[in-house]
Image: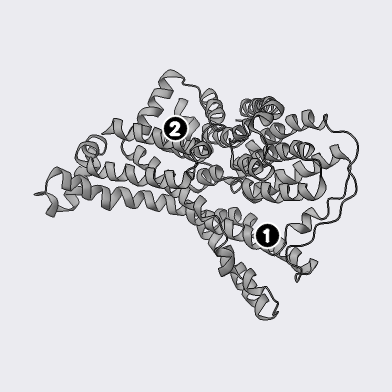
C-alpha cells in the first residue's frame, strides 16, 4: 500500500509538471491526486495506521471503549476520520483562508485602479533606468502582493511603455526574477513563505532580517547583467488610464493605502494577538468590505455593483485555491503514512547537509511546482523544540533550514520560465519562448541564486 501511494504521488506530480504538454489543468490533477490518496489511505487503514500510529491508535481506542469489539480496520478507519482528517483540514484551511483573503484584497485594490497610482508615476525613458525602476518596484510589490499578481500588473505596464516585442521580453524576464526574489523574504510574499509562516516554521522578523539581503543579491546580479544589453532611450508614451474612470486619483490612492496597509498589518496583528494569520487577514478583509459598502452607498456610479466586494470575490483565482487544497491533502497522506519521515531520514543519512539539501530543492523548484515541494519538505521535517542541539537545532522555529528553504524555493523558480507562477504568467501574456529565456536568463538567474545563497550562508556564519 505504501508503494502504491508513492507511485501515485509521483505520477500526479509528473502530471502537474507536464500541465502544458498534457493540456490538462494542474488543478484537476491535484484534486484527483489528493482525494485518491485519501481513499487509498482509508482502504489500507488497518495496515498503515497500526504501523505508524500504534501508540496513538491504542490511546484513541482506550478513550472510546465501544470500539474494543470492532475489527482492526474499523478502529483504524475511525481513527483516520476522527483524528487525522480533522488535523489535516485544520492546518490546510488556515492557509487557504489566508490566501482567499489576500487574493480578494489584491483584486479589490486592482479593480479600483489603485495600482495605477504607482505605475502612472514611472516617467523615465532611459532603458537601463526604466529596467532598474521596474525591477525595484516589482521586488517590493511582490513582498506585499503575490508574485503572480505583481507580474500581471508589471507586464501590462510594459505593454504601455515598450513597443518592441523582443526588447519587452528582456524587461519581462527580469520582472519574473524580481517578483520571485521579492516574494522570498516576506511572510506574505509567496505561497511557500505563507505556508512556512502560517505553520510557525518561521516568524516575520527573522524572515525579513536574514532573507532580505540574499534576495536583493539574487535580483541585483542578473539585473546588472541584463541591463548591459539595453542602451538609449524609449520614445515618449501616454500615461495609463485608470481602470475605473469614475474613481478620482484621491479615491484610488486611498484604496491602495488601505489594501496594502491592511496586508502589512497582518504580521503585526499576529505578533500582538498570537492568533493564526488567517484571522488577521479576514479581519482586514471585513474592514475593507465595510469601507467599500459605506463608500458606494454614498456614491452612486454606473459600475458600483462591479466594484463591490461580492462581485470582486467572484473574480479571485479559485482554481489556484483548489490546487493548493488538492496538493496539501495529498502531502498530508504522505506525512500520516510515514513516507515523508522516511524520506527525511534518507536525506539526512546520505547528504546530512542542510545547505546542499536546500540548494538542490531550489533547483528542483524550477522544474516542479514549489508549493507541493515545500509542503512535502515541511511534512518531512517537523519543527523541533527550542532547546534542540546539534543537527536538529537547524529545524527549530526560525532555524537555518526553514529560512534557507524560503529563499531557495522562492528564488530557485527563476532558473526556468516554467519554474514559477510569475514565469508562467509572463510566458502566457508575452508568448516568451522557453528556449529564449533559457539562453538569456537561466545562467544569470543561476549565478544570482548561488550568490544569494552564499550571502545567506555568510550571514549564518557571522550572525548566528
Q: Position of residue 316 (x, y in %)?
A: 56, 58
Q: Nearer the viewer, residue 160 or 384?
A: 160
Mark yes or no: residue 149 visible.
yes
Q: Nearer the viewer, residue 352 or 46?
A: 46
Residue shown at the point (70%, 65%) measured from the top left: 112
On screen, 126 above or below 298?
above
Q: How is this picture coloured?
A: one colour
Residue shown at the point (17%, 44%) measured from the top left: 73
Lateral position of residue 423 relative to residue 130, left or right:
left
Residue sitting at the far left: 69
Q: Position of residue 381 (x, y in %)?
A: 43, 34
Q: Which mark is residue 265?
A: none
Q: Earlier in the sequence, mark 1 or mark 2?
A: 1
Decide: marks 1, 2 in contact (CB < 8 A)? no
On screen, 142 above or below 402?
below
On screen, 450 above or below 211?
above
Lateral position of residue 185 relative to residue 239, left or right:
left
**Label 1 to label 2, Cα distance in Å?**
45 Å
Q: Dot 1 surroundings within 10 Å: few (below 14), some, or many (20 or more)?
A: many
Q: Which mark is residue 110?
A: 1
Q: In this figure, which residue is indicated by the disc labeled 2? A: 388
Which quadrant is home to the C terminus?
top right
Q: Dot 2 surroundings within 10 Å: few (below 14), some, or many (20 or more)?
A: few
Quarter of the image holding residue 132?
Answer: top right
Mark yes or no: residue 274 visible.
no
Which quadrant is home to the N terminus?
top left
Residue sitting at the far top: 350
Q: Secondary structure at mark 1?
A: helix
Residue shown at the point (73%, 50%) measured from the top left: 156
Q: Position of residue 380 (x, y in %)?
A: 41, 34
Q: Position of residue 387 (x, y in %)?
A: 45, 35
Amino acid at each position: 500500500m505504501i508503494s502504491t501511494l508513492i507511485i501515485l504521488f509521483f505520477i500526479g506530480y509528473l502530471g502537474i509538471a507536464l500541465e502544458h504538454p498534457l493540456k490538462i489543468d494542474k488543478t484537476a490533477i491535484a484534486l484527483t491526486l489528493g482525494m485518491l490518496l485519501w481513499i487509498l489511505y482509508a482502504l489500507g487503514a488497518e495496515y498503515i495506521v497500526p504501523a505508524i500510529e500504534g501508540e496513538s491508535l491504542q490511546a484513541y481506542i482506550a478513550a472510546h471503549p465501544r470500539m474494543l469489539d470492532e475489527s482492526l480496520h474499523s478502529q483504524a478507519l475511525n481513527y483516520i476520520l476522527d483524528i487525522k482528517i480533522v488535523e489535516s483540514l485544520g492546518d490546510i484551511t488556515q492557509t487557504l483562508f489566508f490566501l482567499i483573503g489576500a487574493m480578494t484584497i489584491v483584486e479589490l485594490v486592482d479593480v479600483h485602479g489603485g495600482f495605477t497610482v504607482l505605475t502612472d508615476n514611472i516617467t523615465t525613458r532611459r532603458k537601463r533606468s526604466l529596467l532598474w525602476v521596474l525591477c525595484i518596484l516589482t521586488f517590493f510589490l511582490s513582498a506585499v502582493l503575490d508574485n503572480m499578481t505583481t507580474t500581471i500588473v508589471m507586464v501590462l505596464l510594459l505593454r504601455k511603455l515598450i513597443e518592441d516585442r523582443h526588447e519587452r521580453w528582456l524587461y519581462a524576464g527580469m520582472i519574473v526574477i524580481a517578483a520571485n526574489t521579492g516574494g522570498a523574504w516576506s511572510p506574505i510574499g509567496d505561497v511557500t513563505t505563507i505556508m512556512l509562516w502560517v505553520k510557525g516554521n518561521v516568524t516575520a522578523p527573522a524572515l525579513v532580517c536574514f532573507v532580505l539581503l540574499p534576495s536583493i543579491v539574487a535580483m541585483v546580479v542578473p539585473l546588472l547583467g541584463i541591463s548591459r544589453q539595453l542602451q538609449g532611450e524609449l520614445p515618449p508614451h501616454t500615461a495609463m488610464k485608470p481602470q475605473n474612470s469614475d474613481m478620482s486619483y484621491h479615491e484610488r490612492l486611498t484604496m491602495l493605502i488601505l489594501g496594502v496597509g491592511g496586508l502589512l498589518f497582518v504580521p503585526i496583528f499576529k505578533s500582538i494577538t498570537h492568533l493564526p494569520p488567517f484571522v488577521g487577514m479576514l479581519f482586514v478583509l471585513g474592514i475593507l468590505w465595510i469601507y467599500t459598502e459605506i463608500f458606494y452607498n454614498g456614491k452612486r456610479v454606473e459600475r458600483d455593483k462591479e466594484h463591490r466586494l461580492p462581485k470582486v470575490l467572484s473574480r479571485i483565482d479559485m482554481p489556484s485555491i483548489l490546487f493548493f487544497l488538492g496538493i496539501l491533502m495529498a502531502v498530508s497522506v504522505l506525512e500520516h503514512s510515514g513516507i515523508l519521515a522516511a524520506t527525511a531520514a534518507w536525506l539526512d543519512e546520505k547528504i546530512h547537509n542542510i545547505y546542499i539539501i536546500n540548494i538542490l530543492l531550489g533547483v528542483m523548484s524550477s522544474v516542479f511546482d514549489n508549493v507541493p515541494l515545500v509542503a512535502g519538505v515541511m511534512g518531512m521535517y517537523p519543527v523541533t523544540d527550542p532547546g534542540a542541539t546539534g543537527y536538529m537545532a537547524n529545524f527549530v522555529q526560525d532555524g537555518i533550514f526553514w529560512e534557507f528553504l524560503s529563499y531557495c524555493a522562492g528564488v530557485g523558480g527563476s532558473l526556468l520560465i516554467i519554474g514559477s507562477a510569475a514565469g508562467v504568467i509572463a510566458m502566457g501574456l508575452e508568448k516568451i519562448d522557453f528556449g529564449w529565456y533559457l539562453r538569456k536568463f537561466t545562467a544569470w538567474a543561476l549565478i544570482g541564486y548561488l550568490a544569494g545563497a552564499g550571502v545567506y550562508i555568510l550571514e549564518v556564519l557571522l550572525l548566528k
